[in-house]
Image (cartoon, rainbow, N blue to C red):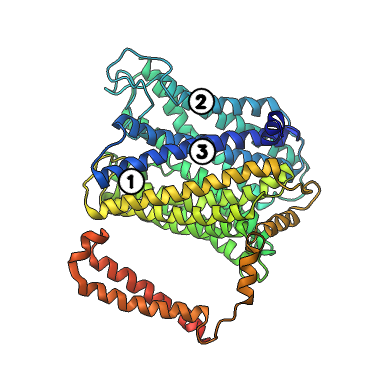
Amino acid sequence: MGFKDLVVALFQLDKDWTTRIVQAMLVLGVIWGLLGVIDSLMVRIVESMWGTFGVLPLTPQEYYASITLHAERDLFGFAQQVIYAIIIYFTIKLLGLEPRAKWLLNIAFILLNIGMMFMEGPILIINGPGFDNYFPSTSWYYLSPIGIYGYSWYVVSPFFYIGWILNDLFVYLAGIWIVYHYAIAARNLKEKLPVPLVFFLMIILLFMIGYSGVTVADVWDILAFYGVTGLDPIANQIAFWIFGHAVVYMAWIPAVAALYLLIPLLSGNPLYSDRMGRVAAVLYLIFSNNIPIHHLYMVNLPIALKVLQEALTYAVTVPTFMTFLNLWATAKGSKNTPVNVITLFTVTAFAGSIFAGVTGISNATISYDAIVHNTDYVVGHFHAMILLGIVPAAMAVLYVMIPMMSGRQWFSAKMAWVHYIGYVVGSILFDIGIETAGLDGIVRRAEIFPRYPLVVSAENLATVGAIIAQLATLVWFLNVVLTLVKGRVITAQGVGLPQLVGNIGLALSWEAAFPAVTNLGRSARISKAISGMGALAILGGILVFVSAAFLLIGKDIDYMVGTSVEWVWITLLTIGILLVAIPGLKATKSI
């Protein structure tokens, strides 16, 4: 295959316009995402090197720039661009539309990626004190007006804020293009939109409403930079955080839409309650954009306003409970659900969203926030939403979408399984580490922190988890490239979505990936007395006794394990009890 053929395959240049523009967004999104992963790795290396050896391998400027660039590249360049690409593709294909005003979406796509480049570096040097001539280290706007000439001793290039404005333009231009096509479809629809498409439309409206505050803040920033107007830091923070919390839902509700799309397909059951799904979509739209103040509880704002924000934050749990009840009832009773990478990523997104959401409820409680405010616990909550809820749902969709677009089956089922296992294990380790550091009082963006064993162990656990997850993601990326270039040709056009998902899933099953291991497992004979469940129960009993043994050892091991012996005891004891209780009773057919 020559270079021209490689470019055609990677960008799907031999396909229709919708596939080409969506593929271009996916390719650029993945590139920005990989760059953002490198940024995050730099952050982890710095914190682990400091904790373990007391050494800072990067300058503070490089460290803080890595954090900001990681957020921008992975959130805007990757997540936002991929979300729009997925919504555009399924909107056009499932509604059977002929795309119009192609120029508008083309311009939006170009503006976004130019804006990402403008955020990268200085471009224009300002003769001001503290000017950053390397990368923007603006602390994610949190300490507004940091970076603005005349208001801060730390000044960045105005092109940083111009890049933000171009990002805002993408959201609105591409959003208008999508809403316009839904309006076209509504003229010919005899029935209501399917629930997944309702969520797709709601997500775009959520983006356009949520970006209102940050668009105002961005324009205000650039005007203040050039002295056209003054700047009120508190008001600017509030305007930014209208976006700052809505972005959580902008990123997560696409995962909910993916679950509404995939769970009925994978389970073979219709959605349990169509009306409940539609009502949940409306409630998400109502309550997701008006709770920015719960990120500013420690700012000098009226107490009544903070209490109102706490109540409105709790209100978001209502559509969430409705959604997960609806999806659980849809999947319940399904006995023939295939076990493959698509199914497992879907289940992970379902369970991970519940776990991450619980940490958000506690974080939104004023009294609790007073303890964890601006610590790594908040970072852990947001990353749990991303790593265990949002990304798994996106991967489940992309494992279906890429063969649909390219007409090629996945190159390697083994690589897909390595991706799933490595990504999930790494993400769990990372989140446990970062939330532990936060609960121990480490503030976010802390390049230097107390080198206490518990904190150091937490930071190193987060680093190990991040490296595992990133290596697994690299395996996925290589699998994508090999699929586009060498994947087996399949017939995707004219095949119904349920059948297509089934065919792709079959090629990504454990049996397809590891046939030798599967055959070995089927031929093995294990005594009924020592069944798999029974073995787990025995392991649980051993852990119960081992946990007590740690109490005998005493405080001498505190520094060896990086935590107190009491935590080791209660952790092992709890795991042991669970293993004795559930597998043990199942092995004896008691439950």
Residue plotted at (74% across, 33% down): 99
Q: Position of residue 265 (x, y in %)?
A: 68, 59
Hey, what amino acid is under mark 2?
A: Gly
Q: Nearer the viewer, residue 112 or 58?
A: 58
Q: Position of residue 480 (x, y in %)?
A: 62, 44
Residue plotted at (50% across, 38% down): 34
User: Which numbered disc flags the more N-terminal residue, 2 or 1?
Assistant: 2
Q: Which residue is mark 3?
A: 33
Extreme residue in the right direction: 494
Q: Position of residue 457 (x, y in %)?
A: 29, 54
- Secondary structure, mark 2, is helix
Could you tell me how far apart the alpha carbons at marks 2 and 3 are, in whole angstroms? 15 Å
Hey, what amino acid is under mark 3?
A: Gly
Task: Answer above or below: position of 588 versus 448.
Answer: below
Can I make out residue 55 in this image? yes
Q: Which residue is mark 1?
A: 306
User: Which numbered disc flags the more N-terminal residue, 2 or 3?
Assistant: 3
Q: Nearer the viewer, residue 330 or 296?
A: 330
Q: 10 Å neighbourhood of mark 2: few (<14), some, or many (≥20)? A: many
What label sits on residue 456 in the rendered view?
none
**Relative to residue 532, is residue 270 drawn left or right?**
right
What label sits on residue 115 in the rendered view?
2
- Secondary structure, mark 3, is helix
Task: Answer above or below: position of 247 versus 235.
Answer: below
Could you tell me how far apart the alpha carbons at marks 2 and 1 are, in whole angstroms? 34 Å
